[in-house]
Image (tube, rainbow, N blue to C red):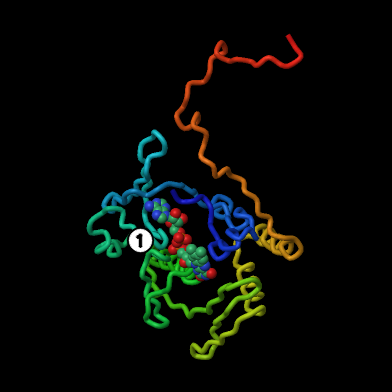
């Protein structure tokens, strides 16, 4: 089941390391997309001829259908052709079907290579797709995807990162460095990319707290197996069966 929030994946490792709260890197779709009707569901089938998607049934309910004029597939890294033989071969010939992000092989006109599966590219593909959708409806010309990667930043340890940045207007030349400067740059860049001022402030606060206090690690779930009574659904004792032990010093 897809989540109901945008997940900021670059900071997932910091959530796993207890530096950040999980909710601070998740942005609820309903508050992020205020002029959009959000329907959360697992797509089980696409009816290309009938222009509708079929969502899995909720508990005990019947499958839900959503009609569409234009369908954009952005299903992430695990490419799923939803059990429809032939969709993989023919899907992109349908004028009403578009794909982007990790699930699509989007050629980059900048270097004639397939785009790498990163958010840096997925975001730009989404913006171009919106323009191309508008152009296709208004009779305008479609533009190919063209983007020169900005570079790569990766955290590799405590207050240490490595960077490979493309020098602007240099014909693709890059500069590499690592250490504290790269780490500060990583934090600055990704903080600015976090969607929403509120989340930026929350993450910045988490980072400042982490400077002065140790990580707040606490086990909130019981990893022991549940008691046998809950596993095998033992009958609840009736009132007459309940034996109240006598208290010492009374009766
Ligand atoms: C740990 C980690 C760190 C990363 N760090 C970086 C980084 O630093 N910089 C960078 O540029 N990129 C980074 N990436 C990559 C980046 O997250 C992806 O490139 C980006 O999220 C791709 O966007 P997308 O929309 O194509 O797919 P996703 O963000 O994966 O979204 C796909 C959505 O489709 C939903 N879905 C799938 N199947 C169905 C179905 N049948 N029915 C309904 N919904 C479905 C999924 O639940 C999901 O919500 C990172 C990824 C990970 C995992």
144, 76: nearer the viewer: 76
Q: Is mark 1 on a helix, strand or loop?
A: loop
Q: Residue, x 58% and y 73% (percent of image)? A: 156
57, 15: nearer the viewer: 15
Q: Which residue is the extreme one toward the front?
A: 248
22, 143: nearer the viewer: 22
Q: Which residue is the extreme one toward the top?
A: 251
Q: Does mark 1's beta carbon lie closer than 8 Å to ligand 1?
A: no
For label 1, the residue is 79
The spot of residue 150 in percent (x, y) is 53, 79
Question: Which quadrant of the structure image shows residue 249?
Answer: top right
State whether residue 167 is above or below residue 207. below
Instruction: Count every numbered label the image shows and give the total.
Output: 1
Q: Residue, x 53% and y 62% (percent of image)? A: 9
The spot of residue 23 in percent (x, y) is 61, 53
Question: Which quadrant of the structure image shows residue 112?
Answer: bottom left
Determine whether, in the image, residue 182 is placed left or right of residue 89.
Answer: right
Determine whether, in the image, residue 45 is placed left or right of residue 145.
Answer: left
The spot of residue 126 in percent (x, y) is 46, 66
Q: Residue, x 54% and y 54% (percent of image)? A: 33
State whether residue 88 is above or below residue 182. above
Determine whether, in the image, residue 61 is placed left or right of residue 198.
Answer: left
Determine whether, in the image, residue 237 is placed left or right of residue 62.
Answer: right
Task: Sort mark 1 into few (<14), some (14-19) or many (20+) by Cα contacts within 10 Å.
Answer: few
Question: Which quadrant of the structure image shows residue 207?
Answer: bottom right
The spot of residue 223 in percent (x, y) is 55, 45
Which image quarter is the C terminus in?
Answer: top right
Q: Residue, x 50% and y 29% (percent of image)? A: 229
State whether residue 68 is above or below residue 200. above
145, 18: nearer the viewer: 18
């Amino acid at each position: 089941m897809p989540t109901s929030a945008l997940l900021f994946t670059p900071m997932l490792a910091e959530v796993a390391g207890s530096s950040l709260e999980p909710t601070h890197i998740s942005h609820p779709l309903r508050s992020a997309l205020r002029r959009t009707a959000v329907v959360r569901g697992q797509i089980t089938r696409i009816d290309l001829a009938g222009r509708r998607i079929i969502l899995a049934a909720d508990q005990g309910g019947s499958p839900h259908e959503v009609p569409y004029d234009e369908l954009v597939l952005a299903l992430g890294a695990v490419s799923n052709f939803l059990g429809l033989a032939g969709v993989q071969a023919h899907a992109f010939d349908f004028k009403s079907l578009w794909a982007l992000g990790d699930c699509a092989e989007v050629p980059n006109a900048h270097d004639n290579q397939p785009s790498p599966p990163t958010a840096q590219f997925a975001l730009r593909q989404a913006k171009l797709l919106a323009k191309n959708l508008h152009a296709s409806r208004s009779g305008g010309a479609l533009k190919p995807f063209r983007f020169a990667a900005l570079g790569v930043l990766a955290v590799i340890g405590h207050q240490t990162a490595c960077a490979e940045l493309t020098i602007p207007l240099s014909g693709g030349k890059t500069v590499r460095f690592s250490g504290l400067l790269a780490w500060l740059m990583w934090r600055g860049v990704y903080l600015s990319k976090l969607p929403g001022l509120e989340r930026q402030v929350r993450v910045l606060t988490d980072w400042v707290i982490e400077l002065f206090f140790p990580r707040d690690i606490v086990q909130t779930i019981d990893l022991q197996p549940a008691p046998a009574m809950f596993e095998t659904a033992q009958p609840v004792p009736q009132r007459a069966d309940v034996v109240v032990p006598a208290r010492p010093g009374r009766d």
